[in-house]
Image: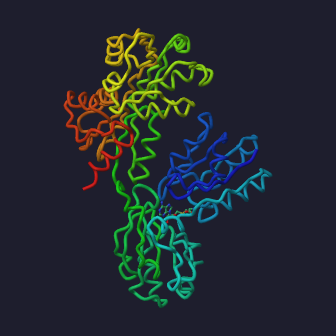
């Protein structure tokens, strides 16, 4: 029974510490603010109780003593409790008050530091807080008009220290802060950088001077950096090729993570709208392997279904294995099997073309409703084909919230015909972004038939090809 006060970092889920991830993954209760990073709350076990304490700037919020009482209550009940807090729990986050309440109640607590926005937001804007020749110190100060903080802060002293001044919670009071710093002697032309929504896909960096800060358009949350270092511009985050671009990914949830990661790597914001879910068929796939000369796999899903029924790679025995493309071959490789045959042209027809002639038995576990190309093509080459439905891709309705998130996106990626059909089945044309990219010709044909104008088809028909096509379509 421990209550962990965990720093969630400023927004980018990748900035959570390893320790934070460790305790989050086994949490029984997660207490989070409304602004918390959803991806981090999702890391907790599905069975964990999730409690939003609704802290929003200026919005309705749970009073601090109620939060303290909640933590004490769950801690006393012997649960593993994670209290997720933005940035670092001990930097302007009232983590000290929560820890004190726990200590007073005799509940064990642990502090897991986080990356504070005071450091991370400037880093993601490319502004070093200290820099040889420009600044030997940085001061982090709150701009909140809380009466205690406002009277306690000696702005003249802050000005006198010089170096870099980092202001959190200073959006509303920025004009006042700038005036006080200038009155205390900091030059009106001191460079200022304000980083809004730092480390998130919404990050925006605004550059001004102390004299311009008061009138500069700015909204919370923002980290304001004042000092000579703010004149440096080592921007990188906002310069990534797909930064600021929103891409809708329609793959099944279990399959979306790799595409998501690749797109995020390039700076895109990914909106996951799973249009299909994979439902295994109740069939003895392992039984079919026995007696097969070849096992032919036409998707990574088929590999997953088959392998989930095999004891290990040896269960394939002497059967040769063909994969329709590199994604399928990679799924096999993870299972410890190297495909004997992968066609260069990664479509069903390409596989049939390069497949040897029979006789013999071919086992073809595939999706319900798969095109008959492989089964018929191999039969025509003299093989006895056991074409077996191993799974079906069942349509998942697109929710109103997902449609809203998709609306206004820049691009949509379709990775199978079924994703197109299902998406259009529950979305309307306004929910289809301007750029439509399909993984291959069959998917593109379906999209075209359903009235979509396809911007690009991936070449090769792989995730890499898809990402490259999206990048070309989205960069001027
Ligand atoms: N404990 C947090 C700070 C909480 S106070 C931390 O260590 O980061 C809230 C203030 O943090 C906001 O008013 C803003 O100044 C800053 N902040 C939080 N998230 C931010 C973000 N993504 N980008 C820029 N500033 C952020």
Q: Which one is nearer the viewer's eye here, 343 or 82?
A: 343
Instruction: Say above or below: 421 vs 5.
Output: above
Q: Which one is nearer the viewer's eye here, 110 or 14?
A: 14
Residue 173's spot in the image, x, y percent? 45, 73
Residue that lies at the very extreme toward the bottom in this rendered image: 185
Residue 144's spot in the image, x, y percent? 52, 69
Q: Could you say which quadrant of the image residue 138 lies in?
A: bottom right
Residue 46's spot in the image, x, y percent? 59, 35
Residue found at x 29% / y 36%: 438
Q: Which one is nearer the viewer's eye here, 198 or 86?
A: 198
Residue found at x 51% / y 26%: 304
Quarter of the picture containing the C terminus is bottom left
Left or right, 275 with respect to 101, comes to left
Quarter of the picture containing the N terminus is top right
Instruction: Say above or below: 51 vs 419.
Output: below
Left or right, 72 with respect to 157, comes to right
Q: Give the color scheme: rainbow, by chain, secondary structure or one colour.
A: rainbow
Left or right, 448 with respect to 181, comes to left
């Amino acid at each position: 029974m421990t209550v962990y006060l965990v720093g969630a970092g400023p927004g980018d889920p990748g900035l959570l510490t390893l320790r934070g991830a460790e305790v989050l993954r086994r949490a029984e209760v997660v207490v989070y603010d409304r602004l918390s990073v959803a991806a981090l709350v999702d890391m907790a076990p599905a069975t964990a109780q999730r409690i939003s304490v609704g802290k929003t700037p200026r919005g309705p919020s749970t009073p601090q003593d109620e939060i303290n009482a909640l933590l004490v209550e769950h801690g006393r009940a012997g649960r593993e409790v994670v209290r997720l807090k933005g940035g670092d729990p001990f930097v302007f986050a009232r983590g000290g008050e929560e820890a004190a309440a726990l200590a007073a109640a005799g509940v064990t607590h642990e502090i897991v530091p986080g990356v504070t926005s005071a450091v991370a937001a400037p880093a993601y804007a490319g502004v070093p807080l200290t820099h040889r020749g420009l600044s030997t110190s940085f001061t982090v100060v709150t701009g909140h008009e809380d009466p205690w903080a406002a009277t306690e802060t000696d702005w003249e002293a802050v000005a006198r220290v010089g170096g870099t001044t980092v202001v959190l919670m200073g959006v509303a009071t920025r004009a006042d802060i700038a005036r006080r710093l200038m009155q205390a002697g900091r030059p009106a032309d001191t460079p200022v950088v304000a980083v809004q929504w730092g480390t998130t896909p919404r990050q925006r960096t605004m550059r001004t001077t102390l004299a311009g800060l008061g009138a500069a358009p700015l909204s919370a949350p923002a980290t304001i950096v004042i000092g000579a270092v703010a004149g440096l511009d080592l921007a990188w985050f906002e310069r990534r090729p797909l930064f600021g671009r929103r891409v809708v990914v329609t793959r099944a949830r279990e399959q979306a993570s790799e595409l998501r990661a690749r797109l995020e790597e390039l700076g895109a914001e990914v909106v996951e709208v799973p249009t299909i879910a994979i439902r295994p068929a109740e069939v003895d796939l392992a039984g079919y392997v026995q007696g097969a000369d070849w096992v032919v796999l036409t998707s990574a899903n088929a590999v997953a279904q088959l392998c989930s029924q095999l004891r290990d790679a040896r269960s394939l025995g002497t059967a040769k294995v063909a994969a329709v493309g590199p994604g399928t071959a990679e799924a096999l490789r993870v299972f410890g099997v190297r495909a004997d045959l992968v066609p260069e042209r990664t479509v069903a027809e390409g596989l049939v073309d390069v497949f040897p002639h029979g006789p013999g038995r071919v086992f073809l576990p595939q999706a319900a409703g798969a095109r008959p190309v492989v089964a018929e093509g191999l039969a025509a080459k003299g093989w006895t084909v056991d074409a077996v439905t191993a799974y079906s891709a069942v349509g998942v309705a697109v929710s109103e919230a997902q449609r809203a998130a998709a609306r206004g996106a820049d691009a949509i990626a379709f990775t199978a015909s079924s994703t197109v059909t299902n998406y259009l089945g529950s979305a309307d044309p306004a929910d289809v972004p301007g750029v439509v990219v399909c993984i291959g010709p069959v998917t593109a044909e379906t999209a075209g038939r359903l009235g979509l104008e396809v911007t690009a088809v991936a070449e090769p028909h792989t995730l890499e090809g898809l990402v490259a096509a999206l990048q070309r379509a989205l960069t001027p």
